[in-house]
Image (cartoon, helix red, strand yellow):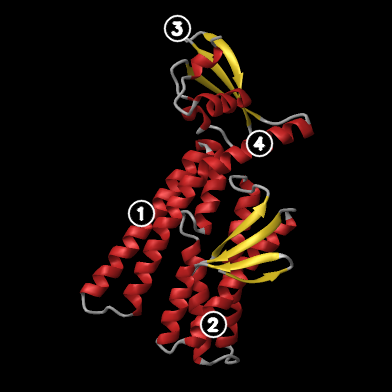
Amino acid sequence: MELFKISGVSIRIHPTFLVILFLYGVLGLAAQALLIFALVVGHELTHLLVAKSYGFKVEGLELFPFGGAAYCDGLFEGRKIEESLMALAGPAFNIALLFAAQVLRWNGIWTAELAADFVRYNLWLAAFNLIPVLPLDGGRVMRALFAETFGFVRTTKFLAGAGRALGIGLAIYGIILGVGGRFTEGPLFFLILGGFFWFAGSKEISSARITFLRQLTRKKEELVKRGLMRSLWLTVQEETPLVRIVEEFTPDRYAMISLTNDKAEMEKILTETDIVEGMMREGIRFPVGKLCKP
């Protein structure tokens, strides 16, 4: 649901966030609900400022109970420095607010009950977002750091699978609380978060290859534009399926594939473009060796 636009950026709110805000309102915690909403907006706007500083055109922002997701005209996923700093900007914003509020409390300047909530919510947003699973900020940092080593698709699948596992754990915890006779806003909160993490993790997994194919297109354009790019060498056998090779590609290196026979002798060298075009033409399970046959 689109709420408004800021400098051409569409701001949308996810249904799970609406449900949680509604629950807080029903329980007479309207002030806390508005505070959470404001902190999440600030958290995400910090992400956007960093994205803009790198020259990315931000087209939209979707708000979730714990943070949000930015949609950019350009790919930052898997790029070590850009994605890491963009991801860490949100938690850094909350940590800065936390310490500022705590200093005011220590000096007796801000003593209202809402001050304690302000500190607690900022701590929760920062700590929760740093959990190393997708779609959280911590997961995005982990992907940026390890995509070059393990491949973008494989790293995304692992971290998104961990996010789904976290969702299952949160949902089970909510059920345990409810069965224990305490079915209040707490269990509902955990059930909603658990469901969100399951679906968000599934979305990350399903979109990983699409995002990566876009990255491959960007790499080819950058190679033509710049005239050079760091390379990644892979040695594979003829029966290796193309999808297995593509999962080893990284966002910032152009892959060269050395094809060997049963005697470990080099038969042919293929480029990343050869592999991707072959996969699009023949399918993901097509053996790489058959690309070399007329």
Question: How dense is the environment of label 2, judged by Cα within 10 Å: few (below 14), some, or many (20 and up)?
Answer: some
Is residue 110 visible in this depiction of the protein?
yes
**Label 4 vs 1, first from the N-terminus:** 1
Q: Which residue is under mark 3?
A: 263
Q: Which residue is under mark 2?
A: 34
Q: Tell me the CA gap for discs 1 and 2.
A: 30 Å
Question: How dense is the environment of label 3, judged by Cα within 10 Å: few (below 14), some, or many (20 and up)?
Answer: few
Q: Position of residue 54 (x, y in %)?
A: 73, 53
Amino acid identity at mark 2? Leu
Q: Tell me the CA gap for discs 3 and 4.
A: 34 Å
**Label 4 vs 2, first from the N-terminus:** 2
Q: Are marks 4 and 1 in contact (CB under 8 Å)?
A: no
Amino acid identity at mark 4? Thr
Amino acid identity at mark 3? Lys
**Label 2 vs 3, first from the N-terminus:** 2
Q: Quadrant of residue 241?
A: top left
Q: Which residue is under mark 4?
A: 217
